Amino acid sequence: MELLYKSFAELGIEYFAVLDYKNLIETGENIRKRAGFEPRSAIIFLLPYYGGECENISRYAASLDYHIALREIGEAVIGSLKECFPEIHAHPFGDHSPINECHAALISGLGVAGDNGLLINEKYGSYVFIGDIITDIPAELLGAITPKAPKRCEGCGACKRACPTGILRGEGESCLSEITQRKGTLSDDEAALMRKYNTAWGCDVCQQVCPHNRSPRHTPVKFFHKERISRLTREKLNGLDKESLRARAFGWRGRAVLERNLDILGDK
């Protein structure tokens, strides 16, 4: 476990835990099989990403694509593990994982479940990504913890009341973030909602009103302080070539979606 502490500390990661794989909820059997080995343990870690305020895009999308950071951190930790366990198999994941990552973080005691569906950490609020490293190292050799009972937030209702589409209140069909990422033509009501909340990509409203995010802490991870775009404009979008756009979290749906959204906001 000391090896993991050292490895994560060098990468700016404060929150992590090791679990026996059998205690996790597997949601992607095919993903696990593609990894090519039978996992025995999982290292769960939180990647804080808040690097400052944004004007018309979600905070998570201001830096380069967080999947890059998750992969780089995972590979670095695996490299450290192989110094002690040279014959191991291990694979890093983030978002597209064989396990339910939020459940894993909850039973690791890394945070509580928010009413908006996000994990809330004691220090970084909900401005965290969840990463995991699946390995065939016996869990006890990595100092696996006993799973904890998942906990929920206090349920103040702030996120539900503020939700732009009402989906958190059970009234809407889509999150505003999903609307901004949808391809094709949006309805007049959807476009009006984007203008009202001034968003060209994503939605942070439920996080902004959460009392746990009242004074957000900046991430110590250097990745999220580099090449930030806090306000997306046509000029900045045009300055991104295909490869550069692909390296952005807001670029995965393609340039046309972003151009449409900027048109909706009146940025010609």
Image: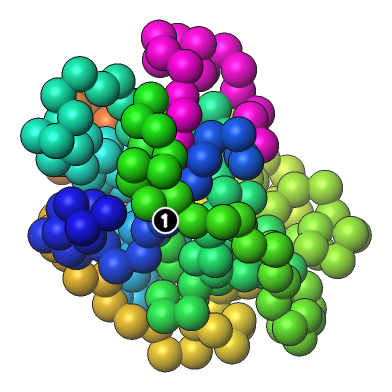
Is 148 in front, or is 188? 148
Residue stretch rendered in magenta on the structure: 25-45
Q: Quadrant of residue 137?
A: top left
In the displayed structure, does residue 156 sit left or right of residue 123? right
Asked whether residue 37 is drawn in magenta, I would say yes
Instruction: Determine the residue positioned at 41% across, 80% down.
Output: 123
Secondary structure under the numbered disc 1 in the rendered image: strand
Read off the residue under disc 1.
Answer: 17
Q: Is residue 107 above or below residue 53?
A: above
Asked whether residue 138 is drawn in magenta, I would say no
Q: Position of residue 7 (x, y in %)?
A: 16, 53
Q: Position of residue 211 (x, y in %)?
A: 59, 88
Instruction: Determine the residue positioned at 15% across, 59% down.
Output: 6
Give amino acid for label 1: Ala
Q: Quadrant of residue 30?
A: top right
Q: Position of residue 62 (x, y in %)?
A: 30, 58
Q: Is residue 171 above or below residue 209?
A: above
Q: Position of residue 71 (x, y in %)?
A: 27, 36
Quadrant of the frame with the N terminus: bottom left
Is 251 in front, or is 14? 14
Query: Does any portion of residue 41 appear in the rendered image?
Result: yes
Instruction: Determine the residue positioned at 20% across, 70% down.
Output: 220
